[in-house]
Amino acid sequence: MLEVRGLKAWYGEAQALDDVDIDVAEGEVVTLVGRNGAGKTTLLRSLIGLHRHVAGSIRFAGTELVGMPAHRRARRGLGWVQDDRGIYASLDVEENLLLPPVVSDRAWPLEKVYDAFPVLAERRRAAGTTLSGGEQQMLAIARVLRTGARLLLLDEPTEGLAPVIVQRIGEIIREVKAAGVTVLLIEQNVKFAATVADSHYLLAQGRIVAHLGNEEFEARESELLEHLGV
Ligand SMILES: Nc1ncnc2c1ncn2[C@@H]1O[C@H](COP(=O)(O)OP(=O)(O)OP(=O)(O)O)[C@@H](O)[C@H]1O
């Protein structure tokens, strides 16, 4: 579904990504793991079209994305869940959910969203920012599913959340996968990544240094923690 080939990215003269190749098949959950500054956010922003100083190829469902503006990539089904969650304080939960335009016939109707996230149904009239961090993360994910996105791009969804909420986010990602949505997720939490993903790309200094299936990733967890500092 997503094929990245020879992707390079720059900030001015400084190169942040070099020759990145990534494949994500339909229905898979794939993580991108690496320490601070490795280039994870740059890669995600390059995929969604917010970072435009790039070279190489990003094919999504057969279409080349490089050169295409971000809003058109969103309409093709790239669903970005922002790391700051992007919840509007002045809108309630339901208004936040209904804000982005529907992009495809895979769009989740509100009833389906509320079935999957009962806590959002309970709090449908609550102002966005009165939600806890975990609830805001759920709202951000639910909002993208409601648009009908085919590929969910998550930027550190567990950052700053309590362990019990991290567990819930893991369940949500597994539910999203079961619903047939493909997921690419940036994650620094190696233990969490191993509970949700089929495979993992390790990024160091702007390059992919390994692509591991989840079994190997789990087996090498302590080594990865030590060498990657993640
Ligand atoms: N706006 C910017 N201007 C210049 N250099 C930048 C900018 N943003 C990131 N960089 C550089 O690009 C490289 C990759 O940064 P990036 O933010 O993609 O890493 P990351 O893996 O997402 O790290 P983090 O987990 O800290 O967000 C780093 O060397 C960083 O200093």
Image (spheres, rainbow, N blue to C red):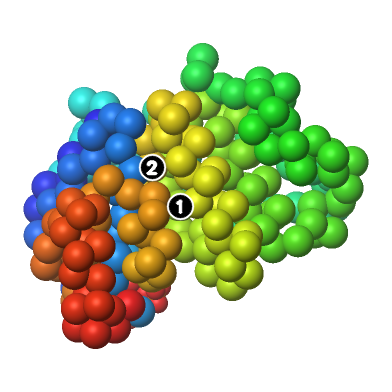
Pick the front one: 18 or 138 = 138
Nearer to the camera, 174 or 128 = 174
Residue 154 has which mark? Answer: 1
On the image, the x and y values in percent for residue 128 come to 80, 52
In the image, 118 versus 146, the foreground residue is: 118
Q: Can you tell which quarter of the image residue 118 is in?
A: top right
Amino acid on which the number 2 mark rests in the picture: Val
Instruction: Residue at 23% x, 53% y: name it.
Output: 214
Q: On the rendered structure, is 123 left or right of 187?
A: right
Q: CA distance from mark 2 to mark 1?
A: 7 Å
Screen quadrant of the N terminus: top left
Contact (Cβ within 8 Å) of mark 2 with mark 1: yes
Q: Secondary structure at mark 2?
A: strand
Q: Residues within 10 Å of mark 2 (few under 14, many from 20)?
A: many
| Residue 41 visible to an observer of this rendering | no
The image quadrant of residue 101 is top right
- Quadrant showing the C terminus: bottom left
Question: Mark 1 near ligand 1 (CB under 8 Å)?
Answer: no
Q: Name above or below for residue 221 compared with residue 61.
A: below
Single out the residue that lies furthest toward the right.
Answer: 125
Task: Give the vertical position of 74 relative to 89 (above or below).
Answer: above
Residue type at mark 1 is Leu
* Residue at x 33%, y 49% (from the top left corner): 197
The residue tagged 2 is 183
